[in-house]
Amino acid sequence: MQRTHLIALAALGSLGLLAGAFAFQYIGGLAPCAMCLWQRWPHAAAIVIGGVGLALPHALVALAGAAAMLTGAGIALMHTGVERGWWTLNLSCTGGGEDLRAMDISALLDPTQGGAVVMCTDVPWSMLGLSMASWNGIASLVLVAFWLAAARARAAQGLRPSGR
């Protein structure tokens, strides 16, 4: 498969995952936690990198896409670990980062103040026993493979004889 096709597939994969996250949020009504939002950034970066990769045929661009997706997979694994209780993080979305003593108690009891904090430890949706964070991690690793295949395809094209 050609390098441009692989880059396009990888970038479209990130676009699809990001669109799915927004659909769960705005159509399905599942508000994201802080770590869910962190997982969106590597996909956004991969989409931009994909656009650059289609315009600039260089293996380093594909490696940058692989790095973005590897970062996304790492964040997803970290979030999965928090959801499953494998480790704890001192974050406000896990209940460990807020100092309630410093807060105004009347604000805590006022239902008109702010929205509900979505906890990173909660799993609002799962399929086959895996949360959205887990599925995002798996999908991100698949996209890493596409990006690496694109980098290899570009490198292989540069080493082939011209065919004259």
Image (spheres, rainbow, N blue to C red):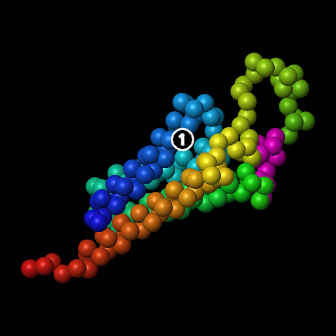
Residue at 34% in and 61% down: 6
Q: Which of 19 and 60 is in front in this view?
A: 19
Query: Residue 122, located in which quarter of the rendered image?
Result: top right
Residue type at tag 1: Ala
For the C terminus, the quadrant is: bottom left
Instruction: Tell me if I can see residue 49 in this picture.
Output: no
Q: Residues within 10 Å of mark 1 (few under 14, many from 20)?
A: many
Residue at 73% in and 34% down: 117
Question: Is 107 on the left-hand or right-hand side of 82?
Answer: right
In this picture, is 44 found above or below 56? above
Which region of the structure is painted magenta? Answer: 87-98
Task: Find numbered disc 1 in the image and state the secondary structure of the residue it sits on.
Answer: helix
Residue at 58% in and 53% down: 135
Residue at 50% in and 41% down: 20
Instruction: Tell me if I can see residue 160 in this picture.
Output: yes
Where is residue 88? Give x, y as percent.
79, 55
Query: Residue 138, located in which quarter of the rendered image?
Result: bottom right
The residue to which callout 1 is attached is 21
Question: Is 161 on the left-hand or right-hand side of 112?
Answer: left
Indicate whether residue 23 is drawn in magenta.
no
In this picture, is 113 found above or below 50? above
Residue at the front extreme of this rendering: 128
In this picture, is 80 found above or below 123? below
Where is residue 31? Give x, y as percent.
63, 34
Q: Is the magenta stretch mostly helix, strand or loop?
A: loop
Where is residue 104? Give x, y as percent.
86, 27
